[in-house]
Amino acid sequence: MKVKRFFSTKRVFFRFLLQFIAFLLLPVIFASSLYLSSVQQAEQSCIDASLISLRHVRNEFDSYVRALDQVATQIMFEPQLNKMATISRPDYGSLEVYSIQQFGESLKSKMSSSPHIDTSFILLMENVSAAYYKDYVVFDLEFFYNNFLKYSDYSFDEWNNIIFQYKNPFFLPEGQIIKEGVSTNALTYVFPLRAGYTGRKTVLFFISKEKLEEFCTGTESNLNRNIYILDSEGKLLFNNISCDFEYNNLNLSLQIDDKQIEGFYFDTIESEKYMVVYARSQLKDVIFTEVIPQSLAMEKVIDIKQTTLYMVIAYLIIGILSAISFAQRNSRPINELINKLIPFSHKLDNTPHKKNVNEYEYITTGVDYLKNTVEESYNELKDIFLDRIFNGNFNNQDEIKQAGEKLNINIDSSHYCAAIIKFVYPDDKKDIYELDIQENDIENICNEFIQELPEFIFGARIRKQQISLLFVFQDNNTEAIEDIMYFLLKTRNDIQEHEGVDIISGVGRMVSTLTDVQYSFEQALFVLKNVEKGQYGVYRYDELPDTSIENIFYYPIEMEHKLINYTKAGDFKNVQSLLDTIYEENITKRKLTRRVGALLMGNLQSTLLKICADSYIEPEYSKKIRQLNVNMPQAVVLERITNIFLEICELYSLKKSNQKDSLINDIIKFVQDHFDDPMMGVPMVAEKFNFSESYFSQFFKEYTNQNFSTYLEKYRINKAKELICENKYDLENISCMVGYNNSNTFRRAFKRVEGITPSAYKENARNK
């Protein structure tokens, strides 16, 4: 029981522990992959080094054989060769003996003429059974074989058949040869002479074992290598090995690709892995092969293997200890959370404690409850956000944007429209719905209604027996209005399915900013208040006869936009003119009710707050505007609003003047810093300060009372005068230093400004 209780309380801990330990396997896998990659790189390094070495062996061998071929070719085309092939056992003192002596001297000269060859050769003629060797000739091949040249692996008949059998050059495997009683090991190169018509002839060259070992080892005489030289049929010609294994176990000829000049493959010999690298001769059909034990490559990564192993072991030990610590630390708050949620979950479900319940069920229950609570709170906040838009409680677009960002709401549209749906019961049905079921029925209808709203409805606000809707569109066109009307008419048809329930819908005008939605909402309310009793359906504000907002008070949206723009431009005249028009149209010509007058003053107050949203306007103006009592006499409130408009207009006018002063100072500084640039002129400065050339010229003259070209010329000449007085530069250099392309233009400009030439000015300055 104690063990079961332990695992029950530590269940979360073990889950975290297993996850952390599983995560520790990733570095282990990575380290293993790194080690395997290092092994592959080490193997490839050995293979590359072997290929380089085999190429050297091949090139040395090919070069040596090429020199032998040259000697054999010279012998084959020797003029006396065919004649010598007809002489058989000449008489002593005859002319044939003399010819043989001359032919022998010629052969010796051909051999000595090649400095790259350090071996002897034998010329054999089958037709006359003769052998030319060093300084003598033997006219009996069998006698010659038995007394001068004998192979340990061949009898005379075997040897005789082999050397005269082939038409192309070939090699006899390296073996023991007894030459003149002296035993030696050498590779025999047989070169058949195909020229002439006097029987078969061939030349034997002997490449000593020492020479072959020199080819294989090169300058690294102490290097342990396993090199094999094979013919095209896989017959072993020579080997230079350091490992003790049978050549027949290698099967080199079966593994080597006939189509490749160079390559490698892996093989297993006597349970040990080897890398076999090969390269083909470029002259003869000979294959050079090196067998490399894989252990040689492993020696290069043994340090990496040990280091990786130690690191993995250390990492696992530290990781497991850390995993235990992390699991314990992370499981503790979850266990505490579960212990707190268990009684809370029981209260929600009104159920007793259940045994063997997954602890995450308690977390899921608590999270679901919190999620529902957050969603309800979010919907309430969104409802408040929408309510503030309808009531015009935001001063500007930035406030709406900031509030929307806090709720993760983005209303990115260019036109908006407000509509209100009011639920009503016909008079002849009222007695049926006198109980609380009436309100419950409407509440259910409203909740069903807002579940599936089209994309062009941003949100809906439910208040008692009516729903306020905010429509959003990208374009203000007939199609948008038709979408609104179709939706509201379809909604009425759907709602009429509930017996005795009908609606009246009011639709305001389309507006271009969220801050103007309040006007569209006011228009929708106006529609509901002015629809005759008993008339149900959908009505637009513009469709009501003689009841537009301008017929209540005169302040169209276009006038508001102009008033804002003129104020920010510091245009006193136009601002005063617009305010006079508002006064004339609303105070003089119309008799506004107190409520409508307050609504007009509220609109003007809202316009001022939009202007004050600019960071340039001090906060005290916003405070002063909000403190206005719009319920005071209309003329008094309008006069105070007019004064505030003019004060703000003056602030913008001052700002504009200061900006121009700062700008003209920046322009003059730019000219003074770059007057020496020959490209300095109206186009250059206008482009620098983002002006058109005509406006820049007008702007500069307005603030300096002189043309830009005149100012630049005078400034350059004054700088030239300073340089002339320094008496360090000639006039040519000075003209370039003050921005003139040539001295003639400089002289004319100087005389135009100063009335004298630069030379005269320089002379006068010197005399002073």
Image: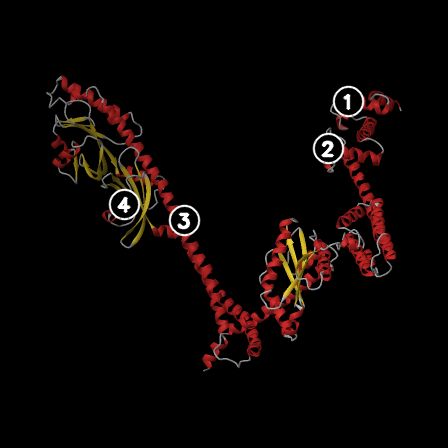
Instruction: Estimate the x, y position of residue 639 in percent, counting from the top left.
Output: 87, 54
As helix, strand or loop, the secondary structure at mark 1 comes to: helix
Single out the residue that lies furthest toward the front: 428
Disc number at residue 41?
3
Numbered disc in front, either 3 or 4: 4
Name the residue rendered at 79%, 26% in the picture.
Answer: 728
Q: Earlier in the sequence, mark 2 or mark 4?
A: 4
Disc number at residue 709?
none
Instruction: Estimate the x, y position of residue 463 in percent, counting from the top left.
Output: 68, 66
Which amino acid is tagged 2? Met
Single out the residue that lies furthest toward the right: 768
Which amino acid is tagged 3? Gln
Q: CA distance from mark 2 to mark 4?
A: 78 Å
Q: CA distance from mark 3 to mark 4?
A: 23 Å
Which is more toward the observer, 444 or 761? 444
Q: Earlier in the sequence, mark 2 or mark 3?
A: 3
Q: Earlier in the sequence, mark 2 or mark 1?
A: 2
Circles 3 and 1, Cβ within 8 Å, touching? The answer is no
Circles 2 and 1, Cβ within 8 Å, touching? The answer is no
Numbered disc in front, either 4 or 1: 1
Numbered disc in front, either 2 or 1: 2
Q: Earlier in the sequence, mark 3 or mark 1?
A: 3
Q: CA distance from mark 2 to mark 1?
A: 20 Å
Residue 411 visible in the displayed image: no
As helix, strand or loop, the secondary structure at mark 2 comes to: helix
The residue indicated by pointer 1 is 745
> In the image, 107: left or right of 655?
left
The residue indicated by pointer 4 is 255
Which amino acid is tagged 4? Gln
Which is more toward the observer, 628 or 136? 628
